Amino acid sequence: MTALEVSDLDAGYGDLQILEGVDMTVDDGEYVSIVGPNGAGKSTVMKSIFGLTTYMGGSVTFGDQDISGYRPEDIITTGIGYVPQNDNVFPSLTVRENLEMGAYILDGVPEDRIQQVYDRFPILEERKKQKAGTMSGGQRQMLAMGRALMLDPALLMLDEPSAGLAPDLVQDMFDRIDEINDDGTAILLVEQNAKEALRRCDRGYVLVQGQNRYEETGDALLADDQVRQDFLGG
């Protein structure tokens, strides 16, 4: 069953249009990656779904709800979580306080959800009193994902989760995303490490100049000579 459906989406920033007629779907529990060259509009797709750009046309549907043009504070209540690439933690707050902020729309702090995050990312429990701004890049990324999981989203959108991580931490980050998906959360991922993203995902989209260029299973895109030559470095 389709969870997210993006249809003929036009969006950008102010008067500047970036996306033109973008189509995209994510089924319940599916893992989908968006890859493409720099400046293709990959992050703009994520921001547009989450209401952070100028909506210009088309539709975004989540479940049975048309969320086209919704504000982020309304979209988060529908079951979509979003982790941006930059500025994705509150540096002056502790780990625990960051997680509490992830549940700010609820009446109280769900201790069971915090424990679930700690169980998934044990380092966060060890450092629950540490200020987020003093943590390593990998730890901050875990915290950002943990905060987004506090509302138990049906779909988790991740923008460049491996950006800035040391090479030995990249595989661990992908493994953790796999585990989140294995537990039933659908994933929509934008990732600079295109080959690894396509190896892991169920389906992938190649975006070029704000438009769909290819859509196939991750394995099929990896095996496509033209895709490999043009977008994956051969």
Image: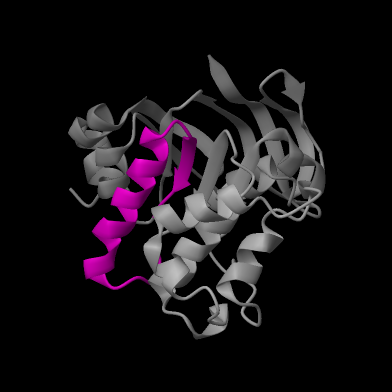
Q: Nearer the viewer, residue 201 or 184?
A: 184
Q: Position of residue 192 (x, y in %)?
A: 37, 56
Q: Is residue 233 above or below residue 10?
A: below
Residue 30 shown left or right of residue 72 in the figure: left
| Residue 14 in view, yes or no | yes
Span shown in magenta? 163-191
For residue 210, what is the image quadrant?
A: top right
List the single residue furthest toward the bottom.
134
Q: Residue at x 22, y 36 (%)?
A: 222
* Residue found at x 38% / y 47%: 177
**Does the segment drawn in magenta span residue 175?**
yes
Residue 173: percent from left, percent from top = 33, 57
Indicate whether 90 appears above or below 69. below
- Where is residue 163? Give x, y as percent: 40, 65
Q: 13 or 202, which is in the foreground?
A: 202
Compared to residue 173, the image places residue 226 above or below, namely above
User: Camera-side residue: 8 or 66?
Assistant: 66
Image coords of residue 54 (percent x, y): 78, 48
Q: How is the image coloured?
A: one colour
Numbered marks: total: 0
In-image side of 29 versus 20 (left or right): left
Q: In the image, what residue occupies the spot 53% across and 81% down?
A: 130
**Near-viewer residue (108 or 21):** 108
Residue farthest to the top, as pictured? 1
Residue 205 in view of the camera: no
